Amino acid sequence: METIINEFKEIAANPKKQLAMYKKQGKKIIGVLPYYAPEELVFAAGMVPFGVWGSNNKNISRAKEYCATFYCTIAQLSLEMLLDGSLDDLSGIITPTICDTLRPMSQNIRVAMGDKMPVIFLAHPQNRATSYGLKFSVNQYTNVKKELEKITGKEITDADILESIKIYNASRKARREFVKLASEHCDVIKPTVRSAVLKAAFFMLKDEYTAKLEELNQKLAALPICKWHGKKIVTSGIIYDNPVLLAALEDNDIAIAADDVAYESRAFRIDAPEDIDPMMALAKQFANIDCDVLLYDAESAKNNRGEFVAKMVKDSGAKGLILFMQQFCDPEEMEYPYLKKALEAAHIPHIKIGIDQQMHDFGQAKTAIQAFAESL
Amino acid sequence: MSTKYTLGIDIGSTASKCIILKDGKEIIGKSLIDVGAGTSGPQRAIDEVLRDAGKTLDDMTYILATGYGRNALMNLACKQMSELSCHAKGAAFLFHNVHTVIDIGGQDVKVLHIENGVMVNFQMNDKCAAGTGRFLDVMARVLEVKVADLAKLGAMSTHRVAISSTCTVFAESEVISQLSMGTDKCDIIEGIHHSIANRVTGLVRRVGVLPDIVMTGGVAQNFGVVKALEEELGQKIHTSPLTQYVGALGAALLAYQETIEE
């Protein structure tokens, strides 16, 4: 088990090495920015989808030429890596445009990349579950598919996509299972390990990743469920993968029971149908995602998302919730009062910790985490 | 039962404070050195508190460290805890009916909600110097006055000016602009006090304005800020002559609690 965990840790900590390895194997690699790009199409094209969610190890320098200071660091550092050569092994990049930062960023990236690599624009519909919303998604995904076909030089067939959907559904299932097992075996799967295992998925071909994860899941399932004497919480936010921050949870005997995080469970909550037209299946998969700060909710007045998260805390047996608020993330900031309301109504203690990927001093965050642990 | 001495050490960003308690009730020694984490302050504060109490480290039953520099003392302390828990404990010891603690330190602001002497909720400021002791340091330097004189000078104000910027850097520009226009320093200082109060009030309201309200930390010594906060919140704010020691006091109390639990 330790060997598998260490492999995931190594991959999560060295994505550039992973990129170089796939390149050396003669594979074409497509960068995938947040959020909800139909990665299945990249895999179906025989290429490697490669998650680009900023970096904890870089400073924003060249991206400043393109970005206003209030762009989130995830977007700015993704562009920084595209500009500084870190992602030169990519054969293209998909730029979804779900939030107000990613929309203009898609054009910044297009201008910045010039002829360096194809930049594939992707607009998701607001009304994603209506017939016209589904049709819009299919049209957009068809554009993405055509652009990918240009890069790979071969047609992506329906059979290829269906096969890819099956592999991705299996991967999503394995990750959901892992999240459950990680809570039951939180003495082994500490926050740093949990994060590394889930993060590695963004830098590996999903069939390879899933095989390794299923092996880990089997080994975990064979262990007796741990009697945890520390505290269990639910995490929420966009991304919190900095090892220093994660270590602060461990230092205070905090385990993660479940998460409402874009980089983690929000990315694999919903599967795609396997018994309909594969392009429509991908559109339906996106349409069926709900209770997500980034996606339009026609019934937002009901605060379904807040209650969904509160229920997650209760069902998971967690004692509280830590919201890692990404600086300048408008959707998360605007959603927070509703989440707070739902958590307070359910008598769930929580704290909000402001973070960004340029943070190097975590003194204040560590104090907040420790005080929260002491108060639970 | 033998007497128990517990030492609470609070290493802040700008000051080091220690308290020695006898049987969790009586303060028999205290020390304060005006430099904090990463300096000679912590060791000097420890030496001084032992001298003040006439004790040695060997006499201490339990030592508990808190504050920004708490982790650096793990070779000495039996345990470290967050300064929020320690301020809650210390404030509840000094003021039995406390429900809200406003702790304004050198580089952060914390608001605690206390129930039955225990912290049940809290808010901390964002990563920003606005509304902290550092904000006052910067303004005092621009105004060419001592930080300790700010309260006295602010009290002499007759026409307070508004310092509207929440950012320390922009507020500094605003102060320079007021100075260049010949505005009375006392009026500017009173504006600065209200600027801090305004900023901190937002944080307090997030936790809830629940009397009794106690203010701790170094900035609580500035009665101009305390008064401005009282005006903004519409509530009486309690302070103590031990305001800078509340974190260390809480640490010593929690240390005593540990000896009982052990």
Image: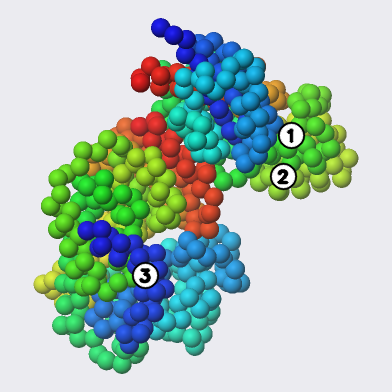
Residue B221 lies left or right of residue B11; in this view the side is: right
Q: Nearer the viewer, residue B4 or A308?
A: B4
Distance CA(mark 2)–CA(mark 1): 10 Å
Q: Nearer the viewer, residue B24 or B180?
A: B24
- In this rendering, which labeled residue sits more in front, label 1 or label 3? 3
- In this rendering, which labeled residue sits more in front, label 3 or label 2? 3
Q: Which mark is residue B171?
A: 2
* Chain containing mark 1: B
Q: Is residue B115 visible?
A: no
| Quadrant placement of the N terminus of chain A | bottom left
Colour convention of the picture: rainbow
Distance CA(mark 1)–CA(mark 3): 49 Å
Q: Where residue A294 sits: x, y (%)?
A: 37, 58
Task: Specify the amino acid type for callout 2.
Answer: Ala
Check disc 1 and report its element: helix, strand or loop.
helix
Q: Are marks 1 and 3 on the same chain?
A: no
Task: Specify the amino acid type for callout 1.
Answer: Gly
Count of marks overlaid on the render: 3
Task: Specify the amino acid type for callout 3.
Answer: Gly
Q: Quadrant of residue A31?
A: bottom left
